Image (cartoon, coloured by chain):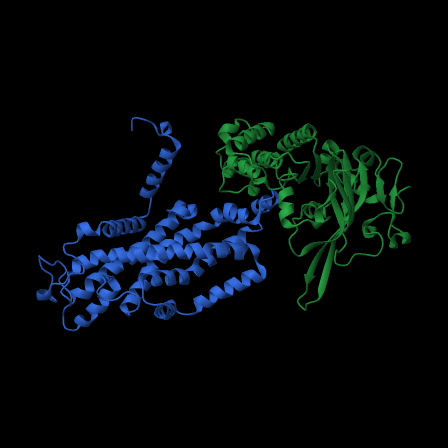
């Protein structure tokens, strides 16, 4: 490098440090980042990669095996499995990201307030959230989506809401540890109203664990939404969503047409796997102790 | 009108036992203090005497189970004890500044020094960021932080203990408070830094004409930097008056014992260390609270001691103050 690092403006230096930080990631975390990047590109630019329209059917080519024309074969409706798998990435992210955003937006403020206020409010909020956690999430999601009507939006809302206790609990635990810390007491003594203490001081100091969880919870959301679709709840069959495709393909497994279910299954496994690895990676970046031990 | 007028302040810790019986620890028992502007008052006493509790009661910083159960705290004629949390927030950090102990952990670890200073100014005033920044740099200069512009973007963990304490003092002074409460401002700092910080504090107090309360258990600090001193024992002020008088002729036996137990005196074997324990706050004795540890205690001490004002103006809570 001809110019030294110190010549760069602060923001440039920060970005350079970030990129260098990435190269220090563990191999597994790096793999996670790579997988998610690939899926991200697939989801955003799906139209560039698809060889066929994902929902137009070729009635003369029903259930054909993988070939040069149809790389992953065709399904029971004569639709191109490869294009549908690619397009399915849009649903994967399109459900997981908003669901996690909703979970964070609900869960973190609840955790902050419950942890900081304590007492009856804390008990009430936490018992409500415990109530949500008592039911197996898949059954609860199934029931709520079935009751509220089958749409993509409902699936996203339900998953986000069901997942918010995870973030609330994480943040609450951190707040409990910090609320009697010296800097919070100083902040009170400095005349900060409660909302300023919560969002300016406690939030930045407690959000680490929750941030590391986002990727893991996104993986959960992908898994659950695919499961719902597999069970025929939420997203319906001709839609190129992986769970729905696996559901359709499952019928053909016994008769030997494996490609209809296997390819979306592999895509699903990789996305969930990648998100989990990414979660580890974020944890590594955020937690200096783990970084140091590497 | 005095800047601060505390009368009969009582703070108790109220617990409920495992068998749901109410137990009360009487942590502050009718504390009376006054403070004028430009005056430095030292509060001394051993651990658990109620020094910090007094400060917290003044500012409404008590957390359950601690609770003010009686008395009044008049600040510029305003009753602080009856203010709502919101009204208190407008006073804390603006008209009353607080410097706490443990400077390093009292700064938000994830906010740059400059931003913390700017924020405390903006919490209480409408001023714009550039104005607040200018003010912050001026304050950092005033508390002796070299090169304020550069330190502005420093993180709390990059500061030494002494620097962090200076930042905290700067934060307390940002809104030019009329009352400054420094709760053990130099605990954990080494002696040279301690002297610098206290010298600085004294200088700033005179420059801004603030009334100041310094809470400490170091009599040396009181002797050097304070105008008045209140000696606390078991939640009571046992002696109160001008530093010069009290250090020359202490009226209360406990004050005498405290003065005799300073390390210098002990080394010269003129002094003696304090024996015994402070009384159990759950179960305070009848009469004088320090009777168990007092060398001159007699039967008379089973009755509550009067508060006697000596010719020097110092008030002493003891039956034998005049002897």
Task: Give the image quarter of residue A214.
Answer: bottom left
Q: Is residue A64 above or below residue A7?
A: below
Instruction: Look at 68% across and 49% down and name the residue there.
Output: B83
Instruction: Look at 53% across and 28% down and name the residue there.
Output: B148
Q: Nearer the viewer, residue B242 or B223?
A: B242
Q: Position of residue A286 (x, y in %)?
A: 41, 47
The N terminus of chain B, quarter of image: top right
Q: Position of residue B209 (x, y in %)?
A: 70, 31
Q: Visible in this render: residue A216?
A: no
Number of marks in the rendered image: 0
Q: Visible in this render: residue A105?
A: yes
Is residue B217 toward the left or the right of residue A164 in the image?
A: right
The chain coloured green carries which letter?
B
Task: Give the image quarter of residue A229.
Answer: bottom left
Task: Give the image quarter of residue B2.
Answer: top right
Q: Position of residue A21 (x, y in %)?
A: 35, 41
The chain coloured blue carries which letter?
A
The C terminus of chain B, quarter of image: top right
Q: Nearer the viewer, residue A5 or A52?
A: A52
Q: Is residue A211 above or below residue B169?
A: below
Q: Nearer the viewer, residue A269 or A40?
A: A40
Is residue A54 toward the left or the right of residue A281 in the image?
A: left
Q: Is residue B193 above or below residue B108?
A: above
Q: Position of residue B215 (x, y in %)?
A: 70, 41
Q: Nearer the viewer, residue B26 or B299?
A: B26
């Amino acid at each position: 490098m001809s110019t030294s690092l110190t010549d760069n403006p602060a923001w440039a230096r920060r970005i350079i440090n970030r990129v260098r930080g990435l190269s220090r990631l563990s191999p597994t975390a790096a793999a996670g980042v790579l997988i998610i990047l690939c899926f991200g590109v697939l989801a955003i630019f799906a139209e560039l990669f698809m060889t066929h329209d994902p929902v137009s059917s070729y009635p003369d080519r029903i259930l054909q095996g993988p070939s040069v024309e149809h790389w992953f074969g065709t399904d029971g409706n004569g639709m191109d499995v490869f294009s549908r798998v690619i397009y399915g990435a849009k649903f994967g992210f399109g459900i997981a990201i908003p669901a996690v955003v909703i979970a964070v937006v609900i869960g973190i403020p609840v955790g902050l307030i419950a942890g900081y206020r304590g007492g009856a409010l804390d008990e009430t909020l936490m018992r409500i959230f415990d109530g949500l956690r008592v039911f197996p999430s898949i059954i609860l999601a199934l029931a709520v989506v079935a009751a509220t009507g089958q749409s993509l939006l409902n699936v996203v809302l339900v998953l986000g809401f069901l997942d918010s206790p995870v973030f609330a609990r994480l943040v609450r635990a951190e707040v409990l540890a910090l609320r009697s810390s010296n800097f919070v007491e100083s902040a009170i003594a400095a005349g900060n109203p409660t909302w300023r203490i919560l969002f300016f001081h406690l939030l930045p100091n407690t959000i680490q664990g929750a941030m590391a969880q986002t990727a893991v919870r996104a993986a959960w959301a992908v898994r659950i939404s695919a499961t719902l679709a597999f069970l025929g709840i939420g997203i319906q069959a001709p839609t190129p969503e992986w769970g729905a495709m696996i559901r359709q393909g499952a019928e053909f497994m016994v008769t030997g047409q494996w490609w209809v279910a296997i390819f979306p299954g592999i895509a699903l496994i990789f996305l969930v796997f990648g998100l989990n690895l990414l979660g580890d990676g974020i944890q590594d970046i955020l937690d200096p102790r783990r970084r140091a031990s590497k | 009108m005095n800047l601060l007028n505390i009368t009969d302040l009582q703070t108790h810790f109220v617990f409920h036992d495992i068998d749901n019986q109410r137990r009360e620890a009487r942590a502050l028992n009718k504390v009376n203090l006054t403070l004028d502007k430009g005056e430095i008052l030292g509060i001394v006493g051993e651990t658990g005497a109620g020094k910090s509790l007094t400060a917290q009661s003044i500012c409404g910083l008590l957390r359950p189970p601690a609770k003010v159960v009686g008395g009044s705290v008049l600040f510029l004629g305003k009753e602080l004890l009856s203010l709502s949390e919101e009204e208190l927030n407008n006073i804390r950090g603006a008209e009353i500044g607080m410097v706490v102990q443990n400077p390093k952990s009292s700064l938000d670890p994830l906010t740059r020094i400059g931003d913390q200073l700017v924020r405390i100014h903006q919490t209480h005033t409408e001023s714009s960021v550039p104005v607040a920044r200018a003010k912050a740099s001026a304050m950092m200069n005033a508390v002796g932080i070299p090169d304020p512009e550069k330190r502005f973007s420093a993180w709390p963990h990059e500061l030494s203990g002494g620097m962090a304490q200076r930042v905290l003092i700067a934060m307390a002074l940002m809104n030019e408070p009329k009352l400054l409460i420094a709760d053990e401002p130099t605990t954990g700092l080494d002696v040279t830094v301690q002297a610098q910080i206290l010298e600085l504090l004294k200088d700033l107090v005179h420059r801004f004409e603030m009334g100041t309360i310094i809470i400490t258990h170091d009599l040396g600090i009181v002797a050097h930097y304070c105008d008045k001193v209140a000696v606390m024992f078991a939640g009571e002020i046992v002696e109160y008056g001008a530093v010069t008088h009290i250090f020359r002729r202490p009226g209360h036996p406990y004050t005498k014992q405290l003065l005799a137990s300073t390390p210098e005196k002990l080394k010269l074997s003129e002094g003696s260390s304090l024996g015994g324990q402070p009384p159990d706050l759950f179960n305070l004795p009848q009469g004088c609270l320090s009777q168990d540890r007092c060398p001159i205690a007699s039967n008379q001490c089973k009755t509550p001691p009067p508060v006697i004002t000596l010719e020097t103006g110092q008030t002493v809570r003891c039956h034998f103050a005049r002897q």
